[in-house]
Image: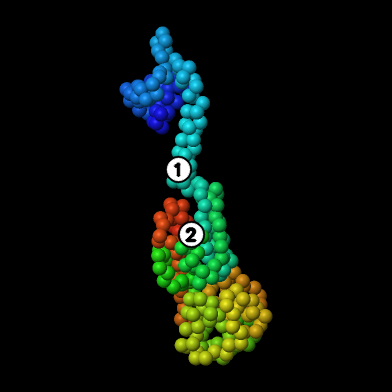
Amino acid sequence: MRLRHIEIFHAIYTTGSITSAARLLNVSQPSVSKVLAHAELQLGFKLFERVKGRLIATPEADMLITEADRIFNQMATISDLADNILHHRTGKIGIGTTMALGFVEIPKLIKQFHVQHPEVKIELQTLHNQNIANHLLRQQSDLTIMFAPRDIPDTKRYDFGKGKLVVVVPNRDDYPADDIININVLHQKPYISIRKSGPLGDLASEHIDSQLGKTKTVIQVDTYYVAIQIVKQGIGWCVIDEFTATANANDDVRILSLEEPIEYPVVGLCSDLQPVSTLVNDFIAHAEQHFLR
């Protein structure tokens, strides 16, 4: 029996008539009769007999109905699952992100998404820039959200918005009182370098070197998070992304904006070697709205 045969057989058996089955399936009565006849021809025996004007299931039909009912329920499950997938009520998304975005921004984004899709499972991992390509191409993440990543082959790029570099200084009287400063004000101040932390660290270093010349580097670190923790100890100042600065701010530091802003893109990447699911596309749409606020 084909699936269509099983569907028709199940409808007739449960409703008791061809007319009711046609109404249940929203098809014509002749169509139901034709499929039933074809099913009986393939099987080699009758499924229903007319007795005094009533359609009565044969003993053979009674033997088949248990399995037919199981298959029908499985078909209904598949239909429900497809509907859930269409309306993003189920599924799983793997997200990779940088530590800086993982403090506050991505959790906020996930919360917004979760409110609309509470049954969707999200797996979040923090990544270094040098690990992005392998992570995507090995399908360990469906989407990565990073700062200014370099061009990576076989990936699709989504520009979510821009962030700014800020200056973080110890909260001391001998540091600038203004909230907006020229970067030259900080010339020869003890500097915490993040030169080797990836594209964003390179961007900060390029601007600082071009405008200040050689800085008085006291410590070099490889993450923005560690840089601001050292600033909190009163050792020096650093130039880091606004997201890390805001997420880790307290009374020990001040966050200063630059007169001439230094901006960087916030970018999403998906593998271009496989289709992007409708669920991931929906998450991308949420990300676009979140970062363009």
Q: Taking the image as drawn, is residue 70 in sight? A: yes
How far is the residue under mark 2 from the one under mark 1? 23 Å
Q: Position of residue 101 (x, y in %)?
A: 54, 67
Q: Position of residue 214 (x, y in %)?
A: 52, 91
Q: Are marks 2 and 1 in contact (CB under 8 Å)?
A: no
Rendered image quadrant of residue 239? bottom right
How packed is label 2: few (under 14 Cα within 10 Å), some, or many (20 or more)?
A: some
Q: Position of residue 213 (x, y in %)?
A: 49, 91
Residue under the point 57% across and 90% down: 216
Q: Residue furthest front?
A: 44
Q: Residue furthest right?
A: 233
Give the mark nearer the N terminus: 2 vs 1: 1
Q: Nearer the viewer, residue 13 or 105?
A: 13
Q: In the image, what residue type sits under mark 1?
A: Ala
Q: Name the residue tied to disc 1.
A: 82
Residue under the point 46% across and 88% down: 210
Q: In the image, what residue type sits under mark 2?
A: Gln
Q: Residue furthest top?
A: 52
Residue under the point 55% across and 55% down: 122
Q: Name the residue tied to disc 2.
A: 139
Work out whether 268 lies above or below 16: below
Work out whether 169 lies above or below 273: below
Q: Position of residue 161 (x, y in %)?
A: 44, 67
Q: Taking the image as drawn, is residue 25 in sight? A: no
Kind of element beneath mark 1: helix
Kind of element beneath mark 2: loop
Q: Is residue 55 left or right of residue 236?
A: left
- Which quarter of the rendering shows the N terminus? top left
Residue under the point 51% across and 47% down: 90
Q: Nearer the viewer, residue 69 or 104?
A: 69
How packed is label 1: few (under 14 Cα within 10 Å), some, or many (20 or more)?
A: some
